[in-house]
Amino acid sequence: MENWINVAPILVITAACFFMMLTDDWKKNMISNGIVFLSAFLILIQFWSFSFSIVKLITGLMSLAILGISINRNDSIQNIKSRSEKIFRTGALTLIYLIIIFISTRVANYLSIPLELIISALFILGFGIIQLGMSQRLYKVFLAILLMFFGFELIYSANEASLLVNGLLALVMMLVSLVGGYILVSEYESREE
């Protein structure tokens, strides 16, 4: 690791992902996603230019705002998770994070990307995959897709310095959130009829 100060944002990303795994409240999920984007920004700003880093942060926050506006307010009713379900979810995410910690140095050496960036990107990507497989709510599925795409984007953009490619990746993330917002609204309207 080049800068040991980056352990703090990685721990914040980890804590936010565990919190999102255990809660069903859409407001808390949105805030946790925003914290993940902000923590990743704190790591990105050290390796990329300010303009590339701020584009990733603003795009992520705008995507969250689009999904937040479209979430049905009836989704604030929480499903009570049993203790065994919470333990299983926490154990699955812990297992994925342990695997990521063991393979991160090899991946960082293979891709020639700083270790902090690889760990944070793989943590976000791993959480997105787990959340996508375990989520029962539609908005959590789209949040997981956004996080998976963001994790991939961090890894891919570290090797690609083109402004056009980074702009297209930001556009794809915005389009995914727009499609997610449209599907959330149309699903709510079909339930009302």
Image (spheres, rainbow, N blue to C red):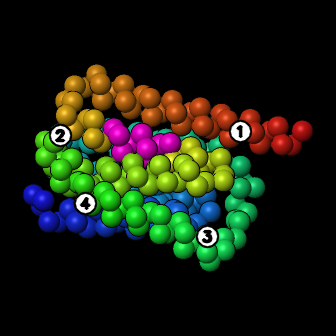
Q: Which residue is mark 2?
A: 111
Task: Tell me the kind of residue under disc 4.
Answer: Phe
Check if residue 104 falls in the magenta segment. no
Screen quadrant of the N terminus = bottom left
Q: Secondary structure at mark 3?
A: helix
Q: Which residue is mark 3?
A: 85
Screen quadrant of the C terminus = top right
x then y, percent, for residue 51: 24, 37
Give the prevailing secondary structure in the magenta stretch: helix
Q: Is disc 1 surrounded by few (<14), some (14 to 19) or many (20+) residues within 10 Å?
A: some
Q: Which residue is mark 1?
A: 185
Rounded to the nearest angstrom, the CA distance separating label 3 from label 1 is 29 Å
CB atoms of marks 1 and 2 within 8 Å: no
Q: Which residue is mark 4?
A: 102
Marks 3 and 2, the one that precedes in the sequence: 3
Rounded to the nearest angstrom, the CA distance separating label 2 from label 4 is 16 Å
